[in-house]
Amino acid sequence: MTILVPRRAATSARLLVDFARECGLETESVLRGTGVPAEELSDPRSEITDEQELVLIRNLVEALNDAPGCGFALGASYQAAVHGIYGYALMSCATVREGIEVGTRYFDLSYAFSRATLAYADDEVRFSLDDRDVPLDVRGFLLERDLSGILAHWTALWGSPVEVRRIEVDESLFGRIAPMVREHGYEVVSVSGPHTVVVDAAAVERPMPTASAAASALLLEECAELLQRRRFRSGTAFRVREILLRAASSGASQERVAGELGLSVRTLRRRLGEEGTSYREVVAETYSAVAEELLDAGLSVERVAHRLGYSDASSFTVAFTRWTGTTPGRRARGARGAGRGSSRRSPGQYSGPDGIQ
């Protein structure tokens, strides 16, 4: 089975490399260990993995001694158009409120590594960034970059930061972030919780100067399709699938998978829930896809059962029937006699090999 690797456009990497050059750093030094040739970054169609960009960021942060302010300077270049379809979708929205809501809904299409949430409280709009899962060694730099990009985009549209009432920064990074935020004219307060840009609710009802109803409808549809593709091949669910595929013949419990990801079982369940799935569903989707592919390739039910770590064909047959709504024998006969038609349904609950649930 082909394993897909989560990828993103190389645009952000190109901005990082350009910034490194401005800081007097050699391109080869910041690309060290990424496996990304410098010439690929000039190709607008080029893609890299999330992990490759993190390696690049680590190289840059280390070379700059993680100096406060560098990420903030870089973030000014991350305005809407840099984000492609996602950025143009924001610009085409009818009102600022719609733009903020679209930005939050499709935030996974940005270059950020944090998670975004949106809340309305009295006369305020609260756009929050949760970076608890961002690696500690690059967390400050990336918060600077993301905050700077958000504020630069707002100022580019309106020319004034007055609608931003304050910026709340978690106490763990407050000492680093507060001076540069104040320097740019924003009030900043320390909190125990996610970093939040707080905006006057009255300001978000204004029309966007670049609004286009026709463009918005098309761009939002493309954003939805792109997000669906990326979520299938990225995130925690994707990483769980990778481990399950590697361990198919020996079995992988939740505890083992969580351990390989460096997570507790509770955190693993939370992250999968945030992605709209569960460990049980990911296991069922993964193993049913593998089983169908092997059966379609002509392997016997017994051999497929063995490949997936089942002690006998009977227990595998029970699980396969729950996953797909048909028996593996019927699936195999159908593949031989009528091509590769699939009768897969939504996966049900099951107990898999070696205690997988």
Image (cartoon, rainbow, N blue to C red):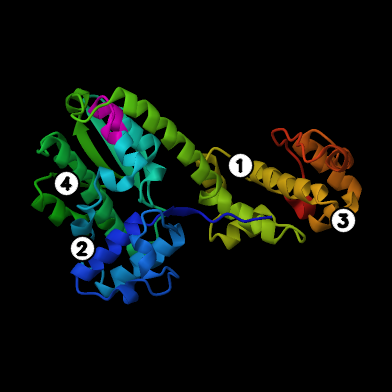
- Is there any visible trace of residue 312 in the rendered image? no
129 part of magenta stretch: no
96 part of magenta stretch: yes
Marked residue nearer the N-terminal end (3 or 2):
2
Marked residue nearer the N-terminal end (4 or 3):
4
Marked residue nearer the N-terminal end (4 or 2):
2
| Residue type indicated by callout 3 | Arg
**CB atoms at circles 4 and 2 under 8 Å apart?**
no
* Residue 169: % across, % down: 25, 49
Quarter of the image for residue 186 reads top left
Residue found at x 84% / y 37%: 338
Give the residue number, with chain letter if any, for mark 1.
278
| Residue type indicated by callout 2 | Cys
Marked residue nearer the N-terminal end (1 or 4):
4
Left or right of 278? Residue 41 is left
Give the residue number, with chain letter if any, for mark 2.
70
**CB atoms at circles 3 and 2 under 8 Å apart?**
no
| Residue type indicated by callout 1 | Ser
Residue found at x 84% / y 47%: 316
Quarter of the image for residue 30 reads bottom left
- Magenta residues, as a range? 90-100
* Residue 68: % across, % down: 20, 64
Secondary element under disc 4, as helix, strand or loop, is: strand
Give the residue number, with chain letter if any, for mark 4.
188
| Residue type indicated by callout 4 | Val
Secondary element under disc 2, as helix, strand or loop, is: helix
Residue found at x 22% / y 53%: 77
Q: CA distance from mark 1 to mark 2?
A: 39 Å
Instruction: Please state which of the two labelled residues, at mark 1 or mark 4, is closer to the viewer.
Output: 1
* Residue 349: % across, % down: 73, 37
